[in-house]
Image (cartoon, grey):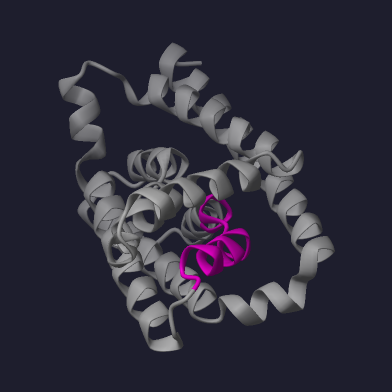
Amino acid sequence: MFNVDLLVNALTTLLVTLDPPGLAPIFLSLTVGLNRQERFQVATRGSLIAFFILAAFALFGDGILGLLGISIGAFRIAGGLLLFWISFEMIFERRQERKEKTGETAVTKDHIHNIAVFPLALPLIAGPGAISATILLGSSLPSVIGRAQLLIVIAASMALLFLALVIADRIDRFLGVTGRAILTRLLGVILAALAVQFVVDGVRSAFQV
């Protein structure tokens, strides 16, 4: 069944978790010395790899939880708390600093041609927050049609993220330091509200309230 509200909620959750505007300047720092075509190739490869990672968790995440004996209610609570912590980092500017440190470590350890895999696809794009959000959203769309719609939402999110990476230099110049700070805090508040809703739904499911 086509549920517009649920799909909009899913798209909002993924986009806020992925944080394309916040990832743009980090992508630029990772690809210093590369020309426009090489950056395009890195962005394409990283986005595709991240899509397949999230798609796998969207399709099989609840099955993995079942094998581990973890209920959907318990995972909703845990995932909601994790997303709330990410929103806390966004509001108080902790997440950007952590991502920048991850990027700096990768540049010194890995060859430039591998940065699309690490750290871009994993963990900067398909990180713990995005994976948790994907599994949570998958549990809300258990039917075959629902999972297909979730895959479309993930694809749309990745397309928007890819666009942000391609025009990362323009986004960075347009927002500036102040603009990025304001946008990150605003998205953090939205993600905090979504995270609390996940926890509430998880408590209701776990205790059958």
Estimate the x, y position of residue 178 in percent, counting from the top left: 84, 62
The magenta span reads 15-32
Residue 175 lies left or right of residue 132; in this view the side is right
Estimate the x, y position of residue 66 in percent, counting from the top left: 20, 24
Residue 87 lies left or right of residue 9; in this view the side is right
62 relative to 1, above or below:
above
Per the picture, the main secondary structure of the magenta-coloured stretch is helix
> Is the N terminus in the top left, top right, bottom left or bottom right quadrant?
bottom left
**The stretch drawn in magenta includes residue 18:** yes
Camera-side residue of 11 and 37:
37
74 relative to 92, above or below:
above
Residue at x-position 57% and y-position 26%: 200
Estimate the x, y position of residue 101 in percent, counting from the top left: 55, 44
Estimate the x, y position of residue 97 in percent, counting from the top left: 64, 44
**The stretch drawn in magenta includes residue 64:** no
Residue at x-position 61% and y-position 79%: 169
Residue 183 lies left or right of residue 146; in this view the side is right
Residue at x-position 56% and y-position 60%: 26
Residue at x-position 45% and y-position 12%: 207
Camera-side residue of 79 and 91:
91
